[in-house]
Amino acid sequence: MPEINGISVPFIPIGDYSGTAPRIKGSKDSFEAIFQKELEKVKFSSHALKRLEERNIELSDDEMNKINTAVERAELKGSKDSLVMMDQTAFIVNIPNKTVITAMPIAESKENVFTNIDSVVFAI
């Protein structure tokens, strides 16, 4: 029976399996590299997704890039929980997990007080 990485498999592998992550067709990066890039992007908690929907906040690719850049900048400074301000929207982001916790239009912020944050980043 053929083996892959020392494990017997009940099929004949197509091509020469070298044990490295396969390349994605049309891409210079391996699956592992693409997967790692996706893990490094900002995610949204279920709570944040609900708030975005309730408050009719839609984010373009350009705005997502701004948020990702802001989170990277906060991470370089050692931030843990940050208020990311972009245009007229405020995002509370857990920096180590790269996760948006909540989002709100600044105009809807009743008291304009944000607690339990250690930094503010302007996403420009």
Image (spheres, helix red, strand yellow):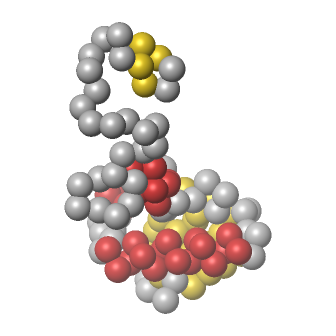
Q: Is residue 77 left or right of residue 24?
A: right
In the image, 36 versus 39, the foreground residue is 36
Give the image quarter of residue 26: bottom left
- Image-based side of 70 in relation to 28, left or right: right
Asked if residue 98 lies left or right of residue 31, the reply is right
Q: Is residue 77 above or below residue 97?
A: below
Give the camera-side residue of 55 and 61.
Answer: 61
Q: Quadrant of residue 38?
A: bottom left
Q: Can you give x and y, in whole percent of width and height, for residue 4 in the image?
A: 43, 25
Residue at horizontal 46 percent and vertical 56 percent from the top? 33
Q: Nearer the viewer, residue 42 or 56?
A: 42
Asked where in the image residue 87 lies, by quadrant, the reply is bottom left
- Residue at coordinates 45% horizontally, 49% vertically from top-left? 32
Residue 86 vertical placement versus 29 (above, below) = below
Query: Which quarter of the image is occupied by the N terminus?
Result: top left
Q: Position of residue 124 (x, y in %)?
A: 49, 89
**Residue 8: percent from left, percent from top:** 42, 13
- Residue 86 locus on image (x, y percent): 48, 82
